[in-house]
Amino acid sequence: MKLFMMRHGTAEDADHVGEVQDFDRALSMRGRKRIRQMGRALRENWLLPDLIASSPLVRALQTAEILAASLDPNEPVIVRRELAPQGDIFALVKELMDSEIESALLVGHEPSLSEFVTSLLGDESWGGGFTKGMIVALRVGRDGVAKALFLMDTKRLEPIPL
């Protein structure tokens, strides 16, 4: 299975949103623009996942919905608690691997995404964290062995081999 692990886009600053809880923080205007650009870059590079799933937190869900609109407006975004902070991403990936889905884009949060990727690839293959809007693509075999394919970030907007 090919996994596109993505951190949500840039959100409103927690200090400037007043009474809004962290769960409800929305993408900033800059964040929305960069995610639209990422969606176009994915489409132009034929990186089209079979499924897009998101954390229920507003900023992640907005990221996933903007990408879905760019890639396939007829496909709904699936909301999964496993992608929320401290969620069990492994359980979700196991469920997806047991299905017929060949590729999935999963939108979540730091540090959960880095922890997941590090546990699959090890520290030597993966040395960094996710910047906002960044995608790390992996190929995960049925045996659980993973290989890093590439990363994309909102500054370069092209796959960079890992």
Image (cartoon, grey):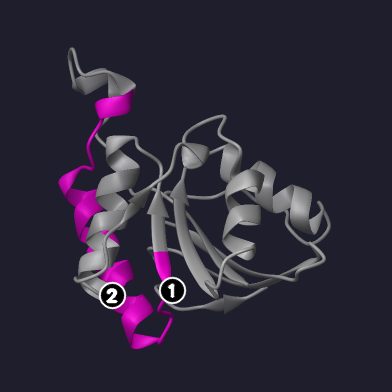
Give the structural element (helix, strand or loop) at label 1: loop
Give the percent coordinates (x, y) of residue 77. Answer: 31, 56
Q: Nearer the viewer, residue 158 or 19?
A: 19
Crowding at label 2, few (<14), some or many (≥20) Cα neighbours within 10 Å? Answer: many
- Check disc 2 and report its element: helix, strand or loop: helix
Front residue of 141 and 20: 141
| Residue 10 appears in view | no
Q: CA distance from mark 1 to mark 2?
A: 8 Å
Closer-to-camera residue (50/62): 50
Q: Residue at x 34, y 35 (%)?
A: 57
Q: What's the magenta region?
A: 23-51
> Of the residues shown, which amino acid type is indicated by label 2?
Leu
Which numbered dot is residue 49? 1
- Is 90 inside the magenta-drawn segment? no
- Residue 100: tell me if it is visible: yes
Which percent across, then down, holds residue 103?
Answer: 52, 72
Q: Which mark is residue 71?
A: 2
**Quadrant containing the C terminus in the rendered view:** bottom right
Residue in view at x 82 percent, y 66 percent: 143
Q: Residue furthest top?
A: 19
Q: Are marks 1 and 2 in contact (CB under 8 Å)?
A: yes
